Image (tube, helix red, strand yellow):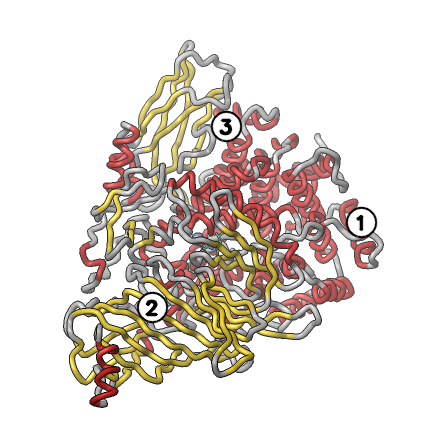
Amino acid sequence: MLLVLGRRVSLSFVKRVIPQDPVLLSKPILQNFRTIKFRVIHSSTVFAIATRQNTDTMPERRPFVRLPTDVYPVNYGLCLKPDLIDFTFEGKLEAIVEVNLATNQIVMNCADIDIITASFVPEGGEGEGEILLAFFSYSLEINATGFNYQNEDEKVTLSFPSALQKGSGTLKIDFVGELNDKMKGFYRSKYATPAGEIRYAAVTQFEATDARRAFPCWDEPAIKATFDISLIVPKDRVALSNMNVIDRKPHPEDDSLLEVKFATTPIMSTYLVAFVIGEYDFVEGQSSDGVTVRVYTPTGKAEQGKFALEVAVKTLPFYNDYFNVPYPLPKIDLIAIADFAAGAMENWGLVTYRETALLIDPKNSCSSSRQWVALVVGHELAHQWFGNLVTMEWWTHLWLNEGFASWIEYLCVDHCFPDYDIWTQFVSADYTRALDLDALDNSHPIEVYVNVREVSLSDECKPRTVDLWDCLEQASGKPIALVMSSWTKQMGFPIIVVDQEQQGDDRILKISQKKFCASGPHNGEDCPNWMVPISICTGEDPGCTKLKVLLDSPETTITINSVSPDQWVKINPGTVGFYRIQYSSAMLESLLPGIRDLTLLPVDRLGLQNDLFSLSRAGMISTVEVLKLMEAFVNEPNYTVWSDLSCNLGVLSSLLSHTDFHEEIQEFIRDLFTPIGLKLGWECKQGEGHLDALLRGLVLGKLGKAGHKPTLEEARRRFKDHVEGKQILSADLRSPVYLTVLKHGDSATLDTMLKLHKQADMQEEKNRIERVLGAISAPDLIQKVLTFALSEDVRPQDTVSVIGGVAGSSKHGRKAAWKFVKDNWEELHNRYQGGFLISRLIKLSVDGFAIDKMAAEVKSFFESHHAPAAERTVQQCCENILLNAAWLKRDADDIHQYLLKRKAPPV
Ligand code: BES
Ligand code: ZN
């Protein structure tokens, strides 16, 4: 799941980090993985090896052959001259290469680039050549006689008239390319000056395989080299790259241009190279370990870089200590890029971000934006070590990079902002989503051996997860290897079924396991088993594990001593084990008071509710049971618990929009959220913090959307004052107010919203509006929103959330959004091509359907409209649609009856 905007790369595997084998060097890169062994590939390059296929984030790609290794780069001398008016660039590459094996061909990656000339000078050839040239008109430079582009493979073969001999040499290539508008490679990003003039910056996004669009190169993560980069730029523009500037001089032929030269990089992969040429301001700080940190913002907005700067300055020394390795570059820049496909990108020393993932305005940014910026900064800075210094050997292992960074970003935020209670949010945002994804038949096991066995630098890799387990086993003295192989070698996770019996002072638990599938437990003969570490707590001390056992068989019986009959027993305290739990009715019943009186911990209240919701979707319990459980949350004070519950209720509400009793579930939502809404009120109170602000926004938005009259009236009043400039809405109240007025609004409301959008100076405010526009109800207005999504007023990366907002808001919106996607498929696919935004678009547009025939329709559409990068997403969506349909058929009547009975006067 690449949850850009709503989050990240498929991380159903955050729980499992598995560096593997090739062991040539033991290096204590991470304290927690102190003894993981790393393989060294030429010079000081360090590789961690692991396996996990992550096709969701991979660009679309034909089966391919890796680059031959007879010639490989040692240093790239690269000079680029972008033209910010014509959107072209000229490039000059002088790469020091090593010829391993005499050859008269060099194969490199190259895409959308025209090579003008190419030549090879053997080491020493140039100096001698010059002398010879003077006296004998003779040079050792060998000109390439052919450039054979294999466009489909994004490669070029340079042919030389004679063999290049084993040894060093310099490969010289002059080339030209386009500053494209596809947010990948070397591309252009549009911005307006403070005076309103439209201009373009030239920026890069190379991960995964787009460095080849900026210069011919060996564009594979394992083929590392150093880089000496120079940029020729208009003298009034900022020019940045991975390293610090070491020279800046006027261009000899044009004094309007500057030639900016950067220091040599450490040895690194091509996907981490970056350059930016544009107009920016910055704020600067120094981390306590001596690194210069700058946050670059659009001109005039330096102030908005301060929050990220504060996070970065705190985070660098934190990671320095955590990894026990200093950050190796003298500087790090964090820069906000207007047009940006991903959320952020960890280029070494020059981290690029969407504006909304970096900029915070003290007045106009809401609390959730602050939290998002902190998480993204924490994530990308972790990659400076984990990813950049230590790099996965191949894209197969990308999960290792992203899985680790997506976990440690929470550690970082917890360090910087302990009041965010971020680990509870982790359970809701990452853990439960990972469980949902991993329960699908179209998920995949962690270890998928991807057989890319070409002759390559990586050929000696023989990945063996077991090495990590060995290390952890030695450190912990526990049977890690035995336990973990059951989790990494098979797909999915178990459902733990629990029943209990009281025997005197003892509580006897009967525990069994089966594979949990989103469609119900695995019932076949060959049901897999896991080695499941199970911890248990009781009502006596809810925060404390009373007993730990390792479930290593399909079922077992456990005795817990001295538990009085009135005490509840709960499995998985802290919600850390990667499984779902099904309690017997009696056990569940006994836990409900712990929810009402809050004696269960917040993560456990959250986990219980989330498990039950997921069991109901899988048909293992009735959804009515979940609704009853939800009603036990009347006294709930915790933001994250509410947020998770609210998210699930949203899913249910969307499902029930297929029925004619949608209004009844709205009433249920109103009733559930009214007490907490009343308690919070609209005004921020003294002593409140981050989580109170988040909770107020959540609750008011929920009430407003569900048509709670007092909330709607107050939202309208405040909106009017806001629009008239009488009383500007506080940033935290804007989303809920906008959502409420739009949901119950008319064409005038939509027009006002679009006007606010136009006037908004901050991208955060534009995005805030874009995301709720789809809430409008009238069909003609929904159409207007969809047209707006593809207009010039919406940044290309944000179109997806506008369409997603429409699809997620109503029954009509869902149909209209899907039709819109089909009707505009060519343009949308062309815009996002092989990128992950296309997967996101598809998921947001079709995941909410709950009719069998829609799964068939979606499948058939993508059979004739290929989107290879989104293949797995399409399969997962079809599976989800069928699951929804089955759920609706199964439970709709019962839910309806329950909702009616709930309101009926007692007889
Ligand atoms: N390296 C990724 C971005 C990426 C991954 C780009 C794969 C291209 C291919 C970056 O570190 C990342 O994970 N970005 C996240 C934001 C982050 C906070 C989770 C993103 O873009 O969603
Ligand atoms: Zn990442």
Q: Is residue 543 above or below residue 729?
A: above
Of residues 798 and 390, the one nearer the viewer is 390
Q: Is residue 466 above or below residue 657?
A: above
Nearer the N terminus, badge 3 or badge 1? 3
Is 98 placed left or right of 407 in the picture? left
Cα distance, mark 1 to mark 2? Answer: 63 Å
Q: Position of residue 544 (x, y in %)?
A: 46, 22
Cα distance, mark 3 to mark 2? Answer: 63 Å
Query: Is residue 664 visible from the viewing direction of this image?
Result: no
Q: Is mark 2 within 8 Å of ligand 1?
A: no
Q: Disc 3 designates what residue?
A: 588
Label annotation for residue 775: none
User: Disc 2 marks which amino acid?
Assistant: Tyr
**Within-10-Å neighbours for mark 1: few <14, some 14–19, many 20+:** some
Q: Position of residue 694 (x, y in %)?
A: 64, 43
Label annotation for residue 713: 1
The kind of secondary structure element at disc 1 is: helix
Q: Position of residue 463 (x, y in %)?
A: 23, 50
Q: Is residue 269 above or below residue 435?
A: below
Q: Disc 2 designates what residue?
A: 76
Q: Is residue 831 above or below residue 313?
A: below
Q: Residue at x 22, y 84 (%)?
A: 139
Residue 592 figure quarter? top right
